[in-house]
Amino acid sequence: MRVALFVPVLLFALSVIPAHGQTAEIQAQLDARVSQYSLSANSLADAILRVAKQFELPVGIEWLKNKPALQGLGLAWKDTTVGDIIRSVVRRYPPYSFRVERGIVHVSRPDLLNDSHNFLNLKVPDFFGVSQEPGGFVNVQLREVVQNIVSPRNLPPGAGVGGDYATGLEERPLTLALRGLTVREALDKLVDVSEHKMWVVTFSNSSELTPTGFRQTETLWHPTPFPDRDQPMWDFLAWEDYHPAAVGTPPQPPH
């Protein structure tokens, strides 16, 4: 992979940025000129994550792991922008599109956004609070709360994960309010303020729903649906956490 930028790519500050500041920050990243860049990827998600890692973009991906989205991809650009690279990638995978919301680059299928079977449209319960916790552990707690909605375990309000949280990242403690947000909005907020800058929800290519009526999920490293009791799952990554060679998506011929 080769890449050259005419101007340095701007990095996100770790502090919370006002909405207009988020918009300006991500737009500057997308408008950054690129003199040369080449990309080879195994799937839609792999392509977007490689670009996000290279240019340090905060991203959220919702994708259905079916045959079209698993097609390989090989592209090269000269004298372009980061935003145009993303557009070119997404155009190879109809009906996906990309948009910027809350300072995050989102890639998804339009039919998933308001789908009642998509757990990302659920609201975070009012009892969920975050006080002086690292972002990775907040994500684990959030997942437990959402799993108790999608796959009820009859846990009392506020019950969740205890014990230690291990990570290779140096993470600062966060205190923030997520209650009342959709799960999608909550993940965006975590991406904005934590060291984890990419979230990926991988929906299984199956018509079978969970007993409570939600789409089944997989992860990048677990390429089959999880048992109902563990639904839903998702990936929550720092840029440096993404190692494409380790992802469990089998390569397909480029198209």
Image: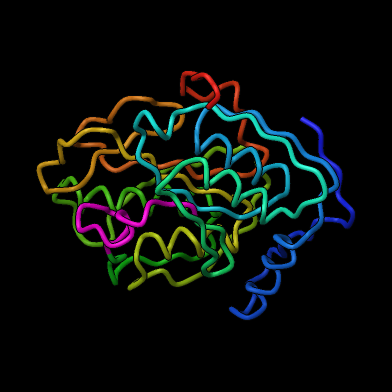
Residue 82 higher or lower than 63, as above or below = below
Please report the residue visible at 81 percent of the width from the left and 44 percent of the height from the top: 78
Does the magenta segment cover residue 139?
no
Comparing 206 with 238, the one in front is 206
* Number of on-image labels: 0
Q: Residue reaching furthest right?
A: 6
Q: In x, y percent, where is residue 166?
A: 55, 37
Q: Residue reaching furthest left?
A: 211
* Span colored in magenta: 107-122
- Describe the colour scheme in one phrase: rainbow
Residue 7, quarter of the rendered image: bottom right
Comparing 93 with 233, the one in front is 93
Comparing 53 with 163, the one in front is 53
Please report the residue visible at 49 percent of the width from the left and 48 percent of the height from the top: 199
Q: In x, y percent, where is residue 139?
A: 45, 51
Please report the residue visible at 60 percent of the width from the left and 57 percent of the height from the top: 194
Comparing 86 with 129, the one in front is 86
Q: Is residue 67 left or right of residue 27?
A: left
Q: Is residue 156 left or right of residue 63?
A: left
Q: In x, y percent, where is residue 187?
A: 46, 58
Quadrant showing the N terminus: top right
Residue 121, quarter of the rendered image: bottom left
Q: Is residue 73 left or right of residue 131?
A: right
Does the magenta segment cover residue 120?
yes
Q: In x, y percent, where is residue 17?
A: 65, 75
